[in-house]
Image (tube, grey):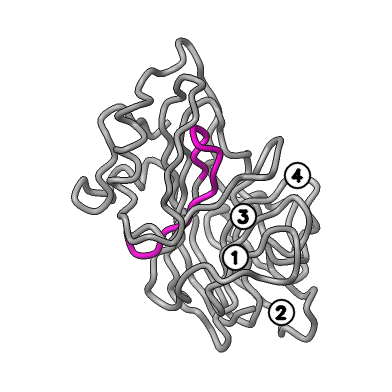
Amino acid sequence: MSNTTNSTISSTTAATTNSTVINSNSKNCNQDPGSYFIDVAQQYSSPVQGETELEPKELNTVNSSGGFLVVSTDKLSVKYTGVNLHGHDVGVIQADRPAPDKRFVYYFEIYVKNAGAKGQIAIGFTNQSFKMRRQPGWEANSCGYHGDDGNLYRGTAKGEAFGPTFTTNDTVGAGINYASQEFFFTKNGELVGAVYKDMKGLLFPTVAVHSQNEEYEYQTQEEMKQQMTVDKISLPLKVSYG
């Protein structure tokens, strides 16, 4: 899947809510993520008392396909250094912690600085035992939105039509709506679509690159707080950044 990429991962989270499930009915629609979150928040706005969770803050340099990646010393940038000779020559890395689930929404983003020759960038979620030389979505217990074809992959190498492709200078996001039990994905501030979350257990934010010189940067929540504006993604007041 891809060539040169630079991407920025940013995370946001919202407080957990009561147990009623909301159906977003948002599959492949053009609703922006701000109004999507607000629709959910209007019905689920009660945080769980006293709940605290550790947030993903950096990239996991231990559990990664290290033979194809160089990670910066601050663990916030990754560069693909392989030459993409095989389908398993994927440079994939997870966040250092799983997505927190004591809230109704978790969300992170990447900014694609360079999509490389093939644009084979993928963003999504994987479990702790995921094979770290495969694209998210190609293996069981993983889900990934892929930039080269716009397809969604859920536990199989056969993708399903999902949304537009993405490339250099695009901002792409992936999230979990715990209220409706859905994965959702965004591109440049608009909701691409949502699908049922058929994976259980701890899930890690995951990004993959697959050709020489692809590169991305992980953005911490504090940086995201400083950079995100209400106009860009209008998160409701009840939503916290963790």
> Is 161 positioned to the left or the right of 64 in the image?
left
Pointer 4: what residue? 128
Q: Disc 3 residue type? A: Thr
Q: Distance between the residues labelled 1 and 3?
A: 14 Å
Asked which secondary structure carries label 4, the reply is loop
Q: Distance between the residues labelled 3 and 4?
A: 11 Å
Cβ–Cβ below 8 Å for labels 1 and 3?
no
Q: Distance between the residues labelled 2 and 4?
A: 24 Å
* Closer to us: 10 or 106: 106
Asked which secondary structure carries label 1, the reply is strand
Q: Nearer the viewer, mark 2 or mark 4?
A: 4
Q: Disc 2 residue type? A: Gly
* Closer to us: 223 or 50: 50
Asked which secondary structure carries label 2, the reply is loop
Pointer 1: what residue? 152
Q: Residue furthest top?
A: 49
Residue 204 is situated, as x and y percent measured from the top left of the image, at 64, 45
Crowding around mark 1 (Cα neighbors within 10 Å: few <14, some 14 to 19, many 20+) is many
Question: Which segment did they paint magenta?
Answer: 176-189
Tag shown at residue 206: 3
Upstream in the sequence, badge 1 or badge 2?
Answer: 2
Cβ–Cβ below 8 Å for labels 2 and 4?
no
Q: Which residue is drawn at 31% across and 38% down?
A: 39
Q: Which of marks 2 and 3 is in front?
A: 3
Compared with 2, 9 (above or below) is: above
Q: Which residue is drawn at 62% across and 51% down?
A: 125
Compared with 23, 186 (above or below) is: below
Q: How far apart are marks 2 and 3 (CA)?
A: 19 Å
